[in-house]
Image: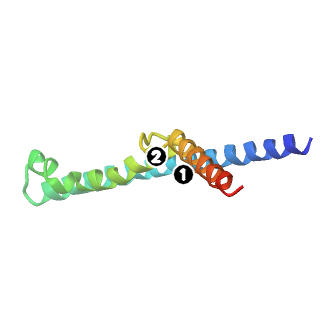
Amino acid sequence: MEIKEGSQREKLRKAKKRVADLKGYYGHLTAYIGVNIFISVAKVIGGINNGETFSEAFFDFGTFATWIFWGIGLFFHTIKVFSLNPLFGKDWEEKQIKKFMDEDRRQSEKFR
């Protein structure tokens, strides 16, 4: 019965961690959108007030710089939270663990 309870506790711990990760991600996404909209609007309004046309102010690199660079960080956060990493995903981890366990077993068999 203890194994079952321990297994349930482990499942609960993993579920809570997953919820916390998702909550953190959605907070990050919300901040990304809100802050970048504010910066972009302020940049465009500032450009217009300095004599630029709407197009000149809007299509300036500075209007999109924060979107791009912060977006790179958000991209990696997305990959981590949603396990989208094809190189080092769960399957990769499990294969590596199995490989090392098999190597360890072979090593111990040599010395018997």
Q: Residues within 10 Å of mark 2 (few under 14, many from 20)?
A: few
From the top left corner, tell me how far across and down residue 73 is, in percent.
Answer: 37, 54
**Residue highlighted by disc 2:** 88
From the top left corner, tell me how far across and down residue 61 is, in percent.
Answer: 15, 54
From the top left corner, tell me how far across and down residue 30 is, in percent.
Answer: 45, 48
Q: Nearer the viewer, residue 70 or 35?
A: 70
Secondary structure beneath disc 2? loop
Q: Nearer the viewer, residue 29 or 107?
A: 107
Q: Nearer the viewer, residue 87 or 48?
A: 87
Q: Nearer the viewer, residue 62 or 77?
A: 77
Please report whichever mark, 1 or 2, sits nearer to the chain's N-terminal start.
Answer: 1
Identified by mark 1, the residue type is Gly
**Residue with the most extreme right position:** 1
Which residue is painted at 72% across and 55% down in the image? 112
Q: Tell me if 67 is positioned left or right of 75 in this view.
A: left
Distance from label 1 to label 2 (Cα)?
Answer: 21 Å
Could you tell me how many numbered marks the image carries?
2
From the top left corner, tell me how far across and down residue 31 is, in percent.
Answer: 43, 52
The quadrant of the rendering that contains the N terminus is top right
Q: Tell me if 18 is positioned left or right of 72 in this view.
A: right
> Which one is closest to the eye, mark 1 or mark 2?
2
Q: Residues within 10 Å of mark 1 (few under 14, many from 20)?
A: some
Secondary structure beneath disc 1? helix
Q: Tell me if 88 is positioned left or right of 73 in this view.
A: right
Q: Tell me if 5 is positioned left or right of 76 in this view.
A: right
- The image's mark for residue 43 is none
Identified by mark 2, the residue type is Phe
Which residue is painted at 83% across and 46% down in the image? 6
- The image's mark for residue 24 is 1
Which residue is painted at 62% across and 49% down in the image? 106
Which residue is painted at 33% across and 55% down in the image? 70
